[in-house]
Image (tube, helix red, strand yellow):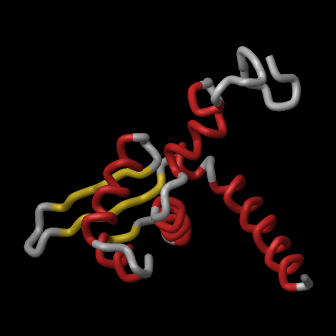
Amino acid sequence: MNKNRGYKTKSPNDNIYESNCPIIYALNVVGQKWKLPIMWRLSENETTRYNELKRSVNGITNMMLTKSLKELEEHELIVRTQYETIPPKVEYFLTQRGKSLLPSLNELYKWGEEQIKLDKTK
């Protein structure tokens, strides 16, 4: 067991992508281009409608938004609620599991701010 990171590797030559690394797993769940912006947007409101997400996540296509939302739902990070109205109304919100990621995202945000400042001074 690696004392510093808490995950097991067989030897220094092991491929980290083939090991049981929690960081790699987490990045596979939320690390794609659109998932974190979607989750960040959902964290700003209790519920958000599909079209609101589409407008607020600049550059995302309908296909990528739908795919990303479906994957986040499969990992139980968000919930999709569909209302049988005309026109159809679909809302999304973060689950408790999704909300538990927010403190880490806030820390990553702070780290990113510091890096931007450091890189500007070069």
Quarter of the image where the C terminus is located:
bottom right
Q: Locate residue 15: give its quadrant.
A: top right
| Residue sitting at x 36%, y 48% | 71
Up the image or down, 116 lies above or below 21; here it is below
Residue 79 spot, x, y in % from top left: 37, 51
Q: Locate residue 93: give its quadrant.
A: bottom left
| Residue sitting at x 34%, y 76% | 54
Residue 68 spot, x, y in % from top left: 37, 57
Closer to the camera, 51 or 96?
A: 51
| Residue sitting at x 57%, y 36% | 25
Left or right: 118 in relation to 46: right
Up the image or down, 116 lies above or below 74; here it is below
Closer to the camera, 58 or 93?
A: 58
Residue 84 spot, x, y in % from top left: 12, 61
- Total label count? 0
Closer to the camera, 122 or 93?
A: 122
Residue 43 spot, x, y in % from top left: 54, 65
Left or right: 4 in relation to 96: right
Q: Locate residue 74: give its quadrant.
A: top left
Left or right: 67 in relation to 8: left
Left or right: 43 in relation to 3: left
**Residue extending furthest toward the front:** 13
| Residue sitting at x 55%, y 71% | 44
Up the image or down, 95 lies above or below 20; here it is below
Quarter of the image where the N terminus is located:
top right
**Residue extending furthest toward the left:** 86
Up the image or down, 27 lies above or below 11; here it is below
